[in-house]
Image (tube, rainbow, N blue to C red):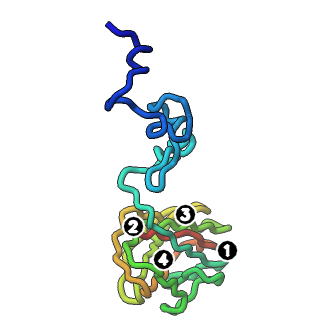
């Protein structure tokens, strides 16, 4: 039986010519990814890149985006409906004046609106909605809390939007026993 040296020095049609299989003169293990080079389409990832990729949820889409919303300080009034968008101003009582335009078609999947009041107020039901094109309202959340911080959150939304549509955040304020004071909003909508 031949030893490795004899087989590796053989000539013939089964040889793996160095010029063909090691053109970069790596002289290394072909199965070790440290010896691989990125191609035009396929890439050899570093350990750091693989860790980052491992943190992406299955089915995640790279083309989702967020739209920020905010409202500057106000002191909510009893039984009033207010609207805000992404302009740095207090909520207003007139709809379709705080528009946030949709830049790309998709589906609003999530809304996270953080609300902070210097004075908490009492725990009557307070609701926020996504208002689409000043015609359709979808509930984000209704909270009954007497805390300074309130988070209106909904990760189960499914609101189809087209480029050029607009949204506002609509707030339906209750008649409080004690009104919240110096209230400010900030948050986002996530669209895929």
User: Mark 2 to mark 4: distance in Å?
Assistant: 27 Å
Which circle's residue, 1 or 3, is located before the other in the chain?
3
Which circle's residue, 4 or 3, is located before the other in the chain?
3
- Which residue in the protein does label 1 denote? 182
Question: Which secondary structure lies at badge 3?
Answer: strand
Q: Is residue 90 left or right of residue 59?
A: right
Which is in the foreground here, disc 2 or disc 3?
2
Assess whether mark 4 and mark 1 are in contact (beta carbons under 8 angstroms).
no
Which circle's residue, 1 or 2, is located before the other in the chain?
2
Name the quadrant of the C terminus.
bottom left
Which is in the foreground here, disc 2 or disc 4?
2
- Using the rendered image of the protein, determine whether residue 162 is visible from the camera's viewpoint: yes
109 over 79 or under it: above or below? above
Task: Name the spot of residue 14 as percent of width and height, x first.
Answer: 32, 30
User: Mark 1 to mark 2: distance in Å?
Assistant: 30 Å
Assess whether mark 4 and mark 2 are in contact (beta carbons under 8 angstroms).
no
Q: Quadrant of residue 137?
A: bottom left
Q: Quadrant of residue 185?
A: bottom right
Which residue occupies the extreme top position in the image?
1
User: Mark 4 to mark 3: distance in Å?
Assistant: 15 Å
- Which residue in the protein does label 4 denote? 174
Which circle's residue, 1 or 4, is located before the other in the chain?
4
Q: Quadrant of residue 4?
A: top left
Viewer-proximal residue, 40 or 73? 40
Question: Which secondary structure lies at badge 1?
Answer: strand
Task: Name the spot of residue 70 as percent of width and height, x first.
Answer: 59, 76
- Which residue in the protein does label 3 denote? 150
Viewer-proximal residue, 152 or 100? 100
Assess whether mark 3 and mark 1 are in contact (beta carbons under 8 angstroms).
no
Viewer-proximal residue, 40 or 124? 40
Which circle's residue, 2 or 3, is located before the other in the chain?
2
Q: Which residue is rendered at x = 58% and y = 72% of the image?
A: 178
């Amino acid at each position: 039986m031949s030893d490795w040296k004899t087989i590796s020095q053989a000539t013939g049609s089964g040889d793996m010519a160095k010029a063909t299989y090691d053109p970069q003169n790596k002289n290394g293990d072909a199965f070790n990814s440290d010896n691989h080079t990125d191609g035009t389409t396929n890439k050899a990832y570093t350990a750091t890149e693989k860790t980052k990729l491992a943190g992406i949820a299955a089915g995640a889409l790279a083309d989702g985006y967020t739209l920020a919303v905010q409202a500057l300080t106000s002191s909510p009034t009893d039984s009033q409906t207010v609207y805000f968008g992404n302009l740095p101003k207090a909520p207003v009582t007139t709809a379709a004046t705080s528009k946030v335009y949709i830049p790309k078609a998709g589906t609003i999947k999530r809304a996270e609106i953080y609300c902070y009041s210097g004075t908490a107020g009492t725990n009557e039901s307070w609701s926020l909605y996504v208002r689409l094109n000043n015609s359709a309202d979808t509930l984000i959340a209704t909270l009954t809390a007497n805390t300074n911080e309130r988070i209106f959150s909904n990760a189960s939304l499914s609101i189809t939007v087209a480029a050029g549509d607009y949204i506002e955040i609509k707030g339906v304020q209750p008649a409080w026993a004690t009104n919240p004071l110096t209230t400010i909003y900030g948050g986002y909508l996530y669209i895929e």
